[in-house]
Image (cartoon, helix red, strand yellow):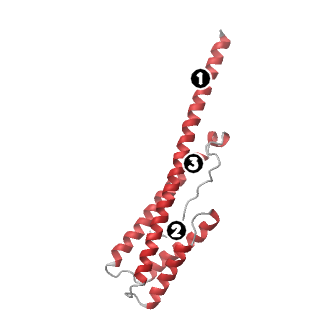
Amino acid sequence: MKVSWALLAIGVVLLLLGAYASWTAGRLDRLHHRVDLARASLETELSRRSALVAELAGTGILDPASSLLLLDAAHRARTAPLDAPADLEAREQAESALTRAIHATGTDVEPWAGELSLAQRRVQLARRFHNDIVVSTRDLRHRRLVTWFRLAGHAPMPCTIELEDGR
């Protein structure tokens, strides 16, 4: 009788551990999906900002030197890849250079000032949202159960994106 109670207790513990592992793996999968969505959203906002800056530079409102500086920075930001982790640093530098160029030139002309500040704010929010999700995902991936049972599968470890975004 004692053996059957012990086997039942072990069975219950294993069942609970399996249920928790399954729930954690599902949660981790959802977090990885949210990281992908947040990265796509950030990419969209960065592209919108660089397109807006390029459009502003081409209007002729700014002096030629400022227009050329903004156009070059916007082009570099648009063409820098964000996909591979090795390319991430180059993309961060290009986007930060665009932010510095925006602040260095007199881009506070109407009606562009409102649109440009909105684009800057949207980039800030998208980056902050992305980084918050990445931190949550990384925290969950560093738990013992996740590492012991390899619940993350083959998904790459997500990384935060650090930009000078005008905060």
Q: How many labels sit on residues? A: 3
Q: Earlier in the sequence, mark 3 or mark 2?
A: 3
Left or right: residue 27 compared with residue 143: left
- Above or below for 151 versus 163: above
**Quadrant housing the N terminus:** top right
Q: Which of marks 1 and 3 is in front?
A: 1
Q: Do the residues labelled 3 and 2 touch (CB within 8 Å)?
A: no
Q: What residue type is labelled 2?
A: Leu
Q: Which of marks 2 and 1 is nearer the N terminus?
A: 1
Label 1, secondary structure: give it.
Answer: helix
Label 2, secondary structure: give it.
Answer: loop
Per the image, the residue denoted by label 1 is 12
Q: Which of marks 2 and 1 is in front?
A: 1
Q: Could you say where residue 65 lies in the image, as x and y percent from the top left? A: 47, 90
State the separation of the CA atoms marked 1 and 3. Answer: 28 Å
How busy is the neighbourhood of tag 3: few (under 14 within 10 Å), some, or many (20 plus)?
A: few
Q: Earlier in the sequence, mark 1 or mark 3?
A: 1
- Above or below for 166 versus 106: above
**Residue at screen point 46% across, 61% down:** 41
Per the image, the residue denoted by label 2 is 163
Per the image, the residue denoted by label 3 is 139
**Residue at screen point 49% across, 65% down:** 43
Label 3, secondary structure: give it.
Answer: helix
Q: Residue 132, which numbered label?
A: none
Q: Could you say where residue 114 lies in the image, as x and y percent from the top left? A: 33, 74
State the separation of the CA atoms marked 2 and 1. Answer: 49 Å
Q: Which of 68 and 5 is in front in this view?
A: 68
**Residue at screen point 47% across, 82% down:** 70
Left or right: residue 56 compared with residue 139: left
Q: Which amino acid does label 1 sit on?
A: Val
